[in-house]
Amino acid sequence: MPDIHMSEPTPFTYNIMTLSGQGQVTALPDTAVVRLGVQTSGVDPKKIQEANASASQAIIDALWEMGINNIRTVQYSVDKNYEYENGKQIDRGFTITSIMEIQTDQLDAVGTVIDTAIAAGANVVDLIAFEASDLSFYYQLALNKALMNAIEKARAISESLGLQTDLVPVRIEENSGGALPPNPFQRELASTPIIPGDMIIEASVTAVFAY
């Protein structure tokens, strides 16, 4: 009886194409974040601390009066000041900095918040930012757009090569993404109007297609 030799089955190999996809959506911010506060300097640390605390409390009271109560302290520092003259270190006292963060959904009141705080004694404006509270929702939309962008690229390439046009990705990797700051706000020092722009949320994926 003749011997029959069975060969090992040859695994089916695929060609692959790896494509990136980008997605972008815009969102209107619904929360304003302002960081501002008081910086005081002097020789007597007790006196400048009292001056700083008094001005900070005046700011908080003024903001409470206008209905802004989401306020928290985010920085409090005491720094020693030195100057150098002719190679010698000279003690110039202390600087105390107290920064508070204000959050509000009254976007049209941001300018008034700043003006009120400055009138009450604030001499530092550290940050003005606008955020969207449901950022994850917008990011998911951007992520879906990124995937569709990669699929559209695969279809265009497959049509050019005369291949099937219903390619489905066999692997998808999420790349880094997130929200970009709003378009620069407009600010005029005379009356401090501040107008937020749209937020841009971006997502990116890498998709692998087999054909």
Image: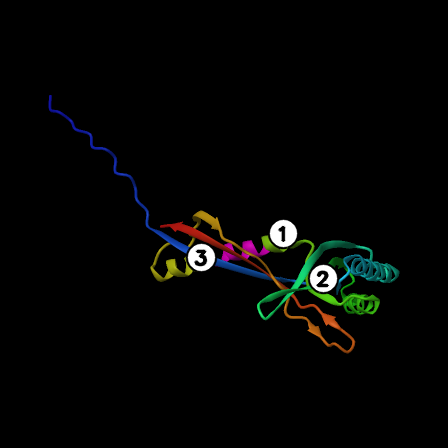
**Element marked by disc 2:** strand
Residue 51, percent from left and from top: 82, 61
The reply to whether the magenta stretch includes residue 97 is no
205 left or right of 100? left
Which residue position is annotated with label 3? 20
Q: Is residue 44 above or below residue 186?
A: above
Q: Amino acid at mark 1?
A: Ser
Q: Amino acid at mark 2?
A: Thr
Which residue position is annotated with label 2? 95
**Element marked by disc 1:** helix
Which residue corresponds to the image point at 23% horizontal and 33% vertical from the top-left?
8
Q: Residues at badges 3 and 1 in contact (C-beta under 8 Å)?
A: no
Residue 137, percent from left and from top: 64, 52
- Which quarter of the rendering shows the N terminus? top left
Which residue corresponds to the image point at 81% horizontal and 60% vertical from the top-left?
47
Towards the viewer: 69 or 145:
69
Q: Residues within 10 Å of mark 3 (few under 14, many from 20)?
A: many
38 left or right of 82? right
Asked whether residue 33 is in view, the answer is no
Foreground label between 3 and 2: 2
